[in-house]
């Protein structure tokens, strides 16, 4: 089985910084795109925050460009999200996502989610 385990998150005041990490464990052949999504309060839909390919190419949501940085360590099967200049609207549960190949099948895997709360 494949598991994604997240760490980091917490509470911070506006303008502060937080870091998230997510490590994949289990038996798999390859990790393709890794990403962070978030889901805000009050039933907001889950949205893509940032993604990174195995070659390091990145893509960010407009709302976080210039403030968040996604990176990965392929040797550790880990993806990171450094969040700077946080705003109250960044408050959400953040989920790690990875496109992983197990044998010949590719599937999406999700972490358990970690809360990020930004106070004004």
Image: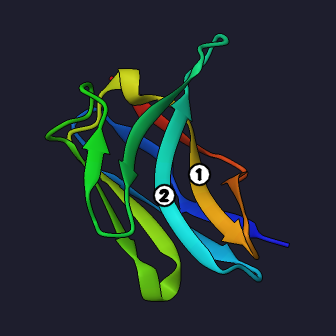
Residue placed most toward the observer, 114 or 53 = 53
Residue at the right extreme? 1
Task: Residue at 48%, 58% (x, y): give it.
Answer: 34
Specify whether 10 is left or right of 59.
Answer: right
Q: Residue tagged by mark 1?
A: 97
The percent position of residue 75, horizontal first and vertical second, equals: 45, 89
Specify whether 16 is left or right of 51.
Answer: left
In 3D space, how far apart are the residues under numbered discs 1 and 2 (Cα atoms)? Answer: 6 Å
Residue placed most toward the observer, 91 or 49 = 49
Q: Quadrant of the N terminus?
A: bottom right
Residue 34: assigned label? 2
Task: Residue at 47%, 29% (x, y): give it.
Answer: 91
Residue placed most toward the observer, 34 or 116 = 34
- Secondary element under disc 2, as helix, strand or loop, is strand
Task: Residue at 64%, 64% (x, y): give it.
Answer: 100
The percent position of residue 92, horizontal first and vertical second, equals: 53, 30
1 and 2 marks in contact (CB < 8 Å)? yes
Q: Residues within 10 Å of mark 1 (few under 14, many from 20)?
A: many
The percent position of residue 53, horizontal first and vertical second, equals: 37, 60
Specify whether 31 is left or right of 89.
Answer: right
Q: Residues within 10 Å of mark 2 (few under 14, many from 20)?
A: many
């Amino acid at each position: 089985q494949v598991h994604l385990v997240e760490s980091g998150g917490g509470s911070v005041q506006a303008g502060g910084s937080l870091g998230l990490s997510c490590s994949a464990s289990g038996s798999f052949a390859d990790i393709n795109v890794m990403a962070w999504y978030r889901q805000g309060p009050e039933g907001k839909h889950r949205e893509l925050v940032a993604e990174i390919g195995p070659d390091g190419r990145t893509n960010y949501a407009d709302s976080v460009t210039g403030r968040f940085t996604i990176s990965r360590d392929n040797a550790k099967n880990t993806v990171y999200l450094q969040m700077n200049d946080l705003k109250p609207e960044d408050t959400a549960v953040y989920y790690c996502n990875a496109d992983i190949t197990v044998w010949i099948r590719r599937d999406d895997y999700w972490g358990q989610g970690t809360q990020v709360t930004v106070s004004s």
